[in-house]
Image (tube, helix red, strand yellow):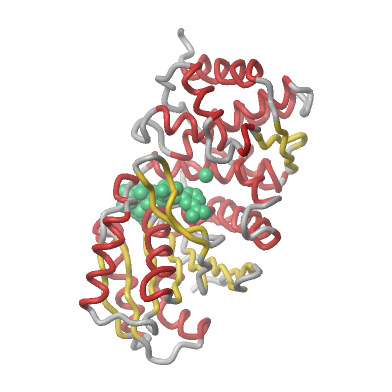
Amino acid sequence: MKPVQRIPIKTASRNYNVIIGSGVLADAGPLLCRELRLPAESCVVISSANVWKHWGETLAVSLDAAKLRWNKVLIPDGEPAKRLATLESAAEQMLAFGCDRSTLLLAFGGGVIGDIGGFLAASYMRGLRYVQIPTTLLAQVDASIGGKTGVNLEAGKNLLGSFHQPECVLVDPDVLSTLDHREYRAGLYEVIKSGAIADAQLFFHTEVHCDRILARDREAVLKCVEDSVRVKGGVVSQDERETGIRRHLNFGHTIGHALEAETHYDLLLHGEAVAWGMIAAARIAADLGRAPVAALDRIQKVVLSYGALPAIPAHDSNIVARVASDKKTVSRTNHFVVVPQIGRAEVVSNVPQDIIAGAVAYVRQLSHPQA
Ligand SMILES: NC(=O)c1ccc[n+]([C@@H]2O[C@H](COP(=O)([O-])OP(=O)(O)OC[C@H]3O[C@@H](n4cnc5c(N)ncnc54)[C@H](O)[C@@H]3O)[C@@H](O)[C@H]2O)c1
Ligand SMILES: [Zn+2]
């Protein structure tokens, strides 16, 4: 196996490592035993039929090699499955397998499995130890790190959940080879985001190596994953509960969330909505004089270089109204993360409605080039 990178995450509630390496999945069992100093213990793997079909055998063989006793619970993934009912049925199956407080839970899948698995670990018998083994690019660079877990309610996303940090995160970029192209690209916009807010060199990498990254060149992808994990890890290590700098990770998310909600979470993938949101936030920053137009140009150019994004079939006024009702719009004050210079972020508040409306119109027109 090739060398692995260990990126430490240090939060008030727990210190742990993100272990990144090509092929680590095949070594997951022995690696976890060493990393967590496990006695021959029982594990439960939470995954989906789709992820298991591609990569289950590899994980199973490695758990057996480490002589771990394990069971698996397959649950549906995709956003509609991120509901309390899915968690309840998984918990019933865990109970039937005899899982108790000593069971180690392995959340093996994309961000949906990670968020449900993490919440299950936080709540099953009042809390289990767990490990994230993310299998989508979005989950590898973002969702699996930082301990945010939860499910959606009818009224909105992630409204029920808790902070529960994993014992360890195992990231094998090789599993991305089976990921659908659209899902893969959606994760890349979070990589671009990480570069824009905190790592100018990573941003540059996404600018100059677009073709290699789109072709999933192993080395180019590994750099995207490692550097994004460093950015996310650095931010959550400073601010576990999102009272300050963790907000910077929301670059592109204020308008992105509004676009997702306005299109009922079924026309745009999260990363695609964030892609439009980053361009809109860069437009806002330029219009407010908080960033040079050159920053908008670079952000827009790199985002669009990864291919056409889905059009935005929503009315500008509805999108602007959604921004005003966002759960992070505290006490009627809106907040936008802006990038005054590539590699640095800050928050601006109380952005005037006409500036937001202008930015929304700007991206909607970009999304309908012939209109
Ligand atoms: N907790 C956090 O901090 C955080 C951060 C960002 C996003 N999220 C959450 O993450 C979720 C989105 O995650 P996602 O984009 O990974 O979606 P997802 O988990 O629904 O996975 C997308 C699709 O990819 C498939 N898939 C997963 N791994 C695969 C592989 N290796 N090969 C082939 N197919 C594979 C899945 O079966 C699914 O169909 C959202 O619910 C979002 O709220 C959480
Ligand atoms: Zn995001």
Near-viewer residue (81 or 275): 81
How many numbered dots are placed on residues in this image? Answer: 0
Residue 52 placement (x, y as % from top left): 27, 62
Q: In which quarter of the image is residue 42?
A: bottom left
Query: Going by the picture, which residue comes out furthest to the bottom?
Result: 39
Query: Going by the picture, which residue comes out furthest to the left?
Result: 96
Measuring 37% from the left and 88% from the top, which residue is drawn there?
41
Measuring 62% from the left and 21% from the top, which residue is drawn there?
356
Q: Is residue 30 visible?
A: yes
Q: Is residue 138 visible?
A: no
Measuring 36% from the left and 78% from the top, which residue is drawn there?
62
Does residue 337 sit above or below 244 in this rendering? above
Residue 347 placement (x, y as % from top left): 72, 38
Q: Quadrant of residue 349?
A: top right
Residue 5 placement (x, y as % from top left): 60, 69
Does residue 212 sit above or below 356 in this rendering? below
Near-viewer residue (217 or 141): 141
Near-viewer residue (52 or 346): 346
Residue 367 placement (x, y as % from top left): 48, 19
Q: Is residue 161 left or right of residue 348?
A: left
Query: Going by the picture, which residue comes out furthest to the top?
Result: 371
Does residue 33 sit above or below 129 in this rendering? below
Q: In this view, does 174 lie to the left or right of 145?
A: left
